[in-house]
Amino acid sequence: MKKLLMIVIAVFTIGTVYGQPVLFNDTLAGVFMDVNPTLSRQAGLFRDGSRDCPGVARYSNTGLHSYFDGGAGNEYGDDIALDVPGGDLLCYELAIYADPDLATVPFDFTASLYDGCPDTGSLIAGTTTTWTVTQTGISYLESTLDTPITIPQNVYMVVSASSDNVGWIISGAAEIGFTDDTFGIDDPPWVCTYFFGGDPYAGFYAVLYLDGELEPCVECPSGGIPEGEPPCGPGYVDEFNGGCNSDPPVFQPISCGDIICG
């Protein structure tokens, strides 16, 4: 059930953000709309759903829950903390949703990286990308940079759409790296302390790929038992032994003294 609710740390006009109702959802609290679960996932501009970004994912948050409609031309964003101190950015990706009943296509969607909340942070030159989207539903947007761009560990991704009824998809907690349970809006001015609600923890869908290689895995000791789980990565859904985090819960039996490698 949706109902009007004010759930932000910073103060703005009660009941509206850029002319959109402030909505509460039983699944994910925040200022957002539901992603229609009856619609099939569409490849959009994300090369038929395949992930072509080079490099190593150093931040990943790839759940598909709801989306935030900031209104045409209005900027909003999310904090991103890499799992390394920083490095050379090669590529980034995000996912958006356009309401099939209300959105007008084509529309433009733009993303940029800042070195902090834009109220005090600066645009990181060369990170801005604009896509022209020609479909409704879910679209996966990917940007491979012409040359690597050095970024710090903590950045802020800022997005905007040229149309109403379009928005950045909201995920949960990051699988790689970290994001606070807050987001920012250029109200104006920029305020980066709006609160998702905390139950569950939330952030926006984004993956950042940096130059480099993953550290080599340690060797399985003598007597170790291979876990047997398929290779995982951004967007991977653990249906092998995700425990209580899986739906339905999935467990792998082990015995006392077993050494499981994987």
Image: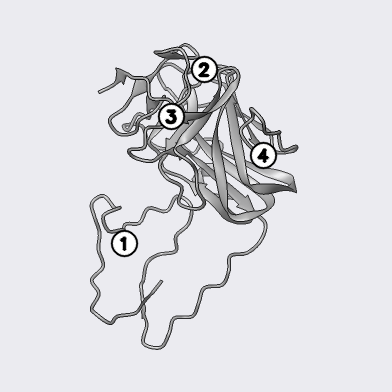
Kind of residue sitting beneath label 4: Asp
Q: Which quadrant, please, contains the C terminus?
A: bottom left
Q: Which of 19 and 238 is in front in this view?
A: 19
Alpha-carbon neighbours of circle 4 within 10 Å: few (<14), some, or many (≥20)?
some
- Residue 173 is situated, as x and y percent measured from the top left of the image, at 42, 45
Q: Is residue 9 visible?
A: yes
Q: In this view, does 262 lie above or below 242?
A: below
Q: In this view, does 2 lie above or below 211?
A: above
Which one is closest to the eye, mark 1 or mark 2? 2
Label 3: state its secondary structure. Answer: strand
Kind of residue sitting beneath label 1: Phe
Label 1: state its secondary structure. Answer: loop
Q: Name the residue under label 2.
A: 71
Question: Could you tell me how far apart the alpha carbons at marks 2 and 4 are, in whole angstroms?
Answer: 24 Å
Q: Which quadrant, please, contains the N terminus?
A: top left
Q: Name the residue under label 3.
A: 67
Q: Name the residue under label 1.
A: 240
Alpha-carbon neighbours of circle 3 within 10 Å: few (<14), some, or many (≥20)?
many
Kind of residue sitting beneath label 3: Tyr
Kind of residue sitting beneath label 2: Gly
Sequence-earlier tag: 3 or 4: 3
Sequence-earlier tag: 1 or 3: 3
Q: How many labels does the image show?
A: 4
Alpha-carbon neighbours of circle 1 within 10 Å: few (<14), some, or many (≥20)?
some
Question: Could you tell me how far apart the alpha carbons at marks 1 and 2 are, in whole angstroms?
Answer: 40 Å
Does 257 sit left or right of 66 as displayed? Answer: left
